[in-house]
């Protein structure tokens, strides 16, 4: 039982698309996870910094974009961050002060393009990597560019065992954002690189998401840490285009959470939790990854590339 680390997922949201307030919120939640639960790794939701513009259309129609939508994009652009930037430096400072490794969804600004990105921040090394969502989902393509194969890291990270501090636990960590998790070849790529802690920042609060997360944990024989936003109308700016200003209800739920931590055998270790902001924590025994691969390694002894590689079936 020496190869155990403690990890948390944060169910929360952006503070009204305000960067300063959101960074303060991040620090408060990270310190709480450390001080209350002793967490060593924390995962924040998709678009935690920058915000997820739930319900917005950006006044886009096939063949036409209206000035109002361009103005809304300016506000959204201004809420995003560059990587690296003073914002990522602040995140690194909190990571260092708490000793917590951070995986966080952000809206990244690069030139004139926005990306839905996950960043990896180490307590010692600071910002160590990022992953850009390879294909935004549906109307997200109005506002986010596409990532590519240059940002698909699986990071090696050493932790002290939370049950035997003199022991070092070697881990491999990846992040797959929201509906990227429905791309079989992307999942397989991460499995092939040996991911053990499969982070899934999201805003998908539907019940079907839970089935997907359990399937991925079981299929990949990895721990799945899914952090989903929980947001109400009061968490959005007063002029947010996705909210009916004439009938605004501060307590109306916009994104309903469902964060969860799952073991390599598909067992739910924490969550899902709904209807509130929350922090879920669980101990991850990395030996469970090996135990799981005893009878299922989809990129090893349970693979049949001779039969399943697409080119095999070509004339």
Image (cartoon, rainbow, N blue to C red):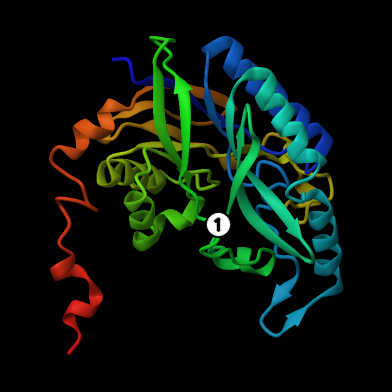
Residue pictured at 63% horizontal, 27% vertical: 124
Q: How many marks?
A: 1
Question: As rendered, which of 140 and 159 lies closer to the eye?
Answer: 159
Q: Is residue 38 left or right of residue 116?
A: left
Position of the N terminus, as image quadrant, is top left
Question: As rendered, which of 94 and 25 lies closer to the eye?
Answer: 94
Q: Is residue 242 visible?
A: no
Image spot of residue 126 (x, y percent): 66, 34
Position of the C terminus, as image quadrant, is bottom left
Q: Is residue 89 left or right of residue 279?
A: right
Q: Is residue 276 visible?
A: yes
Question: As rendered, which of 111 and 230 lies closer to the eye?
Answer: 111
Image spot of residue 209 (x, y percent): 41, 46
**Other residues around mark 1 within 10 Å, as few (<14) / some (14–19) / many (≥20):** some
Residue pictured at 77% horizontal, 49% vertical: 81
Image spot of residue 160 (x, y percent): 46, 18
Question: As rendered, which of 164 and 41 lies closer to the eye?
Answer: 164
Which residue is situated farthest in the bottom direction here? 315
Q: Is residue 263 above or below residue 37?
A: below
Identify residue for label 1.
Answer: 151
Residue pictured at 68% horizontal, 34% vertical: 251
Residue pictured at 48% horizontal, 50% vertical: 176
Q: Is residue 99 above or below residue 233?
A: above
Q: Which picture quadrant has residue 294?
A: top left
Q: Is residue 278 above or below residue 145?
A: above
Q: Secondary structure at mark 1?
A: loop
Image spot of residue 21 (x, y percent): 81, 32
């Amino acid at each position: 039982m020496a190869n155990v680390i403690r990890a948390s997922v944060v169910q929360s949201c952006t503070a009204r698309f305000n960067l300063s307030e959101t960074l303060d919120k991040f620090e408060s939640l990270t310190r709480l996870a450390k001080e209350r639960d002793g967490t060593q790794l924390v995962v924040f939701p998709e678009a935690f910094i920058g915000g997820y513009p739930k319900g917005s259309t950006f006044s886009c129609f096939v063949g036409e974009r209206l000035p109002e939508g361009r103005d809304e994009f300016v506000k959204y652009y201004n809420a995003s961050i560059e990587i690296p930037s003073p914002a990522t430096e602040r995140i690194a400072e909190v990571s260092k002060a708490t000793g917590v490794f951070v995986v966080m969804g952000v809206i990244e600004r690069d030139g004139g393009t926005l990306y839905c990105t996950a960043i990896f921040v180490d307590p010692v090394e600071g910002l160590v990597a990022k992953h850009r969502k390879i294909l935004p989902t549906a109307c997200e393509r109005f506002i986010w560019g596409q990532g590519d194969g240059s940002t698909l890291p699986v990071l090696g990270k050493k932790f002290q065992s939370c049950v035997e501090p003199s022991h070092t636990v070697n881990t491999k960590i990846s992040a797959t954002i929201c509906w990227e998790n429905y791309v079989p070849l992307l999942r397989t790529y991460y499995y092939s690189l040996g991911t053990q802690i499969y982070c899934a920042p999201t805003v998908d609060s539907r019940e079907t998401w839970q089935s997907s997360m359990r399937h991925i944990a079981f299929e990949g024989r990895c721990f799945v840490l899914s952090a989903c936003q929980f947001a109400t109308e009061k968490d959005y700016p007063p002029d947010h285009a996705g909210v009916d200003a004439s009938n605004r209800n501060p307590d109306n739920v916009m994104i309903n959470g469902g964060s969860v931590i799952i073991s390599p055998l598909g067992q739910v270790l924490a969550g899902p939790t709904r209807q509130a902001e929350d922090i879920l924590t669980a101990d991850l025994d990395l030996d469970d990854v090996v135990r799981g691969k005893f009878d299922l390694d989809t990129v090893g002894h349970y693979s049949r590339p001779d039969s399943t590689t697409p080119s095999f079936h070509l004339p």
